Each structure stands twice: as C-alpha cells, then as structure tokens.
Amino acid sequence: MTKLKELLAKKIEEHRPRTQSLLKNHAGKKVGEVTIGQVIGGARGIRSLVTDVSYLDAAEGIRFRDKTIPETFACLPKVPGSDYPYVEGFWHFLLTGEPPTKDQTLEVVDDWKSRSQVPQYVYDVLRAMPRDTHPMTMFSAAILSMQRESVFAQRYREGVKKDQYWDSMYEDSCNILAKLPTVGAYIYRMKFKGDAPIAPDPKLDWAGNFAHMMGIGKPYDDVSRMYFILHSDHESGNVSAHTVHLVASALSDPYYALSAGINGLAGPLHGLANEEVLRWIQKFMAGLGGKEPTEGVIREALLETLKTGVIPGYGHAVLRKTDPRYMAQREFCLKNLPDYPMFKVVSQIFNVAPKVLMEQGKAKNPWPNVDAQSGVIQWYYGVTEYSFYTVLFGIGRAIGTLANITWDRALGYAIERPKSLTTSMLEEYAEKGKSDKLADD
Ligand code: MLT
C-alpha cells in the first residue's frame, strides 16, 4: 500500500465519527431555508452538499483544503526547474488535507506512472468516431469505455464491505487520473495535428508529460500544472462536480461518474464558456479594426456588445468579486506574455468591463471569472483549436471530483434523492405561505 493510501485510511478513520455524530445527534437541525425562487431557479444557494476538499467564498473565491490559491501553490513541492508544483502532490493534498513532502510527492509520481498505460481499445474507440466529433464527446467516451476496468464495480460484485468502498474508489480514481493526460493529448494530436500522436516520456511528471505529448515546449508544462490545479475543484455545487457526486451516489463507479460529469462540463453555461470567450475576444479584436485598445475604445466596443448580448467570461453564480483563478492566470501572463496583444486587450477589458456592467446594471457580479483569461494563454502557446479548451478543463476537474467521490464513499454519503413539487403546490405556498407542512410531505 502506498504511503498516501495509508495516510488517507488514517484520515478517514479520524473523520468518520464526525459525520456519524452529525447524523446521529444533529440530523434535525436546520442549515437554511428554501424559497420558491430557489426551487425554480436551479437550487441556487441551497446548502445541501458537503465536502471538505474545497470551499467557495463569494468574496474571496476558492480555497483548496482551506488554503487560497497562492497558499496552495506555495505549500506544494515544485517540479525542478519549474515555477509550479507537481499535480501529483496536489492530489495528495486534496485527498488528505496535508501538503506532501518531496518524497511523498514522488511516490505519487511513480504510482501514477505505473498506472498510466492506456488500453489499446480506448484508441480504437476514439479512432472509430468521426473525426469531426467534439473533443469533449471523445474525452467522455474514452473514460466511459474504460469502465470495464473498474476495481470498485468488481469488488462490489464480490460483496466488499461498505466501509471498504473508498479503497476501490481510490484505486479507480488513480487509474483514471494516471491516463487522462495521454487520452487528452491523443485526442488533440489525432484531431488537430495530422493524426501524429506523441508517445509519453516516462521521465516526466504528469503535467510535464501532458505538455510533451501535446508537442509544446516550455513553459507549457507550467501552464499545464497551473491550469489543472486551478480548474480542479470549485466546491460541490457546480454542474460537473455535482454530477460526478450524484452519479457516484448511486454507487456507479468513478468511470461512469466522471464521464457523466464531463458531459455536464461540456455545456456552454459551464466549461464550454472558455471556448466562447476566446471566440468572442477574437471577434471583438477584429471589430476594433487595429485601433489602439484605449479605455475609451474598449468602453464603446463593450457598450456595443451589451446591446445584443453579454460579455463572455464576466459574472459567476456564486462569486461576487474577481475570480482568484483569473488573477492567478493574469499573474502568469504578466510574467510570461506581458506584451501579447490579445493579453493587452483582455487586461483592458478587465479595467473597463466591471464599470460598464455596473453602470448598465447588467450583472450581479460584474467581475471576470476563470474563463476570461484561460483561452488567451492556450492560444499564445499554439493551442488555437478552441474546441479542445474544455478538455483541458475536464482533465483538471477530474482531480477534484475524484478526490470528492473517494471521500463520499469513505463517509457513506447517501444516494441523492431530493424531493420535487408540482407548480400547483408552489402556487399554494405562494398564496398561503404553508411552507412547513408541504416541505415535509
Ligand atoms: C466552476 O469552476 O465549476 C465554475 O466556476 C462554475 C461554478 O463554480 O459554478
């Protein structure tokens, strides 16, 4: 057993009594109220999920295991010669809440390498799909095709005890994660680079190997490390994380659950937004007709955009301040591509758009989110095929969601089964305010 798995087992044993005590002694206590607006409006803000892997504060942004993004980057061992940490160490940190030592990190690096061989039939499945299939469809299908490998499904059939479910969830999660860079890069090279896949380099770390298999030199390895960590988790209520949790709650194994979550991420209101932002920025830049992007020019162009639509990449369901994931990427740009014209336009939009949106009363949150910056970096390093951007998001999102469902099974979280009401019932609530009685029906 790896040291990480031993430590995780210890953490699980320590944590279980907390969940059990909450259920046994406090199950009836309220954590909030539910309004008709929330019932119809996508369950927005309803506190009905639990995770310790990350927490999203509306004003501050995401914390991974209670650490901000800069604290997270600072506490993890760095890849030699790189500015960013090993993603493998981040996995250790997300699972256990403890920043790993260099040795603990390298153990995960080796463990994932030993699990990284992608079965030939996955390539066959990908190659059998029409070449114009969306990369997210290919990515999801590749993950689902490997479901036959599930250790969880096999041990479940063999009657493993409930308190041991987490063990095989962990095994499946590591087996999946180890293969995702190869699967993602294969899709990219098959679809967009003349069907010329690049073999993995066993000397490299997980994200460094991804950059290598994409065929892109330094510092794209650091871009990958940063990108995968930033996109890994955003607490449990977003569509991809929630879907993975929901599907796994039926004791579907991690292959089923992650593939389903990737399908949710493929929606334009979720992960596909980064593709839309880049498309819009390019159109926006073309519209500037070569004019210097001064504040005045950008302001006029944004007002024109708002006549018919929204500013892509601005606003968020939970956040009410600039997304710290945006800031982390901006910092990277300021260091590595400060004079890149597209970055300059994005920066100028950042200076102007919040004011314009506030003046127009257009958004509860007029600040940029993670998507407003990410495509620019990819484009700069030569990944100009927008439709691939969400796969990058998906590789990152796998890390957080798989850590979460490993813990879900460790703590025995129940199958999700919220209650629905009819429109007439809601109308009855609205008229008579009979909130308490019907809610318990
Ligand atoms: C995410 O990272 O999942 C997005 O920012 C969406 C969200 O948190 O609702």
Image (tube, rainbow, N blue to C red):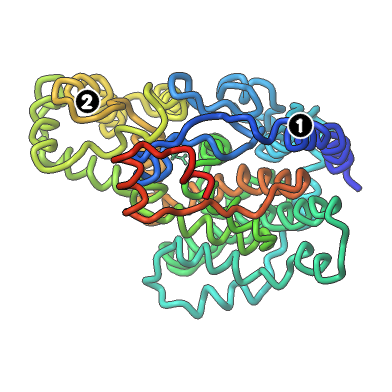
- In the depicted view, which residue is nearer to us: 274 or 257? 257
Q: Is residue 92 shown left or right of residue 344?
A: right
- Depth check, mark 1 against mark 2: the one in front is 1
For this orientation, the residue located farthest to the bottom is 128
User: Residue 55 at x, y = what percent?
Assistant: 57, 29
Q: Is residue 334 above or below residue 441?
A: above
State yes or no: discs 1 and 2 in contact (Cβ < 8 Å): no
> 251 or 74, which lies in front?
251
Residue 336 appears anywhere in the view: no
Badge 1 local density, few (<14 within 10 Å), some, or many (20+)? few
Other residues around mark 2 within 10 Å, as few (<14) / some (14–19) / many (≥20): many
Q: Amino acid at mark 2?
A: Ala
Which residue is at 86% across, 41% downward? 9
**In the image, residue 214 lies at what x, y percent?**
52, 53
User: Measured along the vertical axis of the image, is residue 40 above or below residue 73?
Assistant: below
Locate residue 328 relative to residue 298 in the image: left or right.
right
* Residue 71 spot, x, y in % from top left: 61, 19
Question: Residue 290 occupies which quadrant of the picture?
Answer: top left
Q: Indicate the secondary structure of the residue bearing disc 2.
A: helix
Front position in the image: 33 or 124: 33
Q: For residue 42, what is the image quadrant?
A: top left
List the residue tagged with mark 2. 353
Number of labels in the image equals 2
Q: Which residue is mark 1?
A: 25
Question: Could you say which quadrant of the image residue 88 lies in?
Answer: top right
Please report whichever mark, 1 or 2, sits nearer to the chain's N-terminal start: 1
